[in-house]
Amino acid sequence: MGKLSFKLLQLTRSNAKSKQPCLVNRLHYASGYTQQNAGFSLLELIVVMVMIGILSAIAAPGWLAFVNRQQVNKANDAVLAALREAQREAKNKKLSYSVSFQKNSTTQNVEVAIYRTDIGISTWKSLGTDIGVSSNKFLLGGNLAGQNIASTTTNSPVSYPLSASAKITFDYMGALTLPNNFGTVAAGTEAPGLKIVVAVPSSTNSTLPSSVKRCVIVKTLLGSMLTAQDDKCS
């Protein structure tokens, strides 16, 4: 019995040794095959690059429009914040406060000034810089013909750029100072209110607004405000 076991052990070792070269040859062949076929062909790379280019061309306009909408929303929030700050300062200090907006002709930034009405403007600051708004990419418009006076033009009351003399002023109670005018009222309609508009420029003419607009509207004598967009800002 012991001799038989010894012979079987020898036979097993012999078979294992005979299979080792075959296994080594297979591994060597597989390794060689993998090395020769690694990576991508030039044709494959070209196809991938063409596909990326096509997808980018399709996605880029939509992405740009999305970014513009986000930026113009932030700019409009900054306009609203400026008006509310002036109204709050007027109430707190029991003095008349004004807000003026302008498009800087040098930097092209939309700028805002909040100031005591009796002292006048001391400094301008770029609109929305603290919240990451690039205000030089937008148009500034409105329907203000003077202090708290809306334009009486009915066909196109909102003009670009906004008049430098235009401003909104709050009295010591936070209401609009007199005189004031909320615009021409057609039969069966309400007055348009005092509008400050920020708009994305048209792709064909950078001096004209596109359909993407945001605005803040002062609606009542008490200085209540609301925000609107697109055709409601015209």
Image: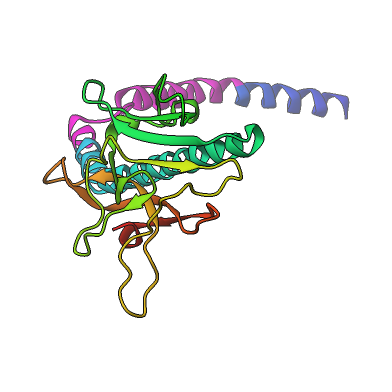
State the residue at coordinates (56%, 36%).
85
178 and 200: which is toward the camera: 178
Q: 35 and 88: which one is in front?
A: 88
Tell me the quarter of the picture where residue 124 sits: top left
Q: Residue furthest bottom?
A: 188
Observer-nearest of 37 and 133:
133
Position of the C terminus, as image quadrant, is bottom left
Q: Position of residue 31 (x, y in %)?
A: 41, 23
Please name the residue shown 27% across and 55% down the image. Answer: 151
- Tell whether position 214 is magenta: no
In the figure, is residue 105 to the left or right of 68?
Answer: left
User: Which quadrant would residue 7 be assigned to in this image?
Assistant: top right
Question: Is 41 one of the magenta-colored residues?
Answer: yes
- Residue at image point 21% right, 60% down: 153
Q: Which residues are magenta?
A: 17-46
Residue 184, image x, y percentages:
30, 65
Magenta region, main secondary structure: helix
**Left or right of 24: which side holds 14?**
right
Q: Position of residue 43 (x, y in %)?
A: 17, 35
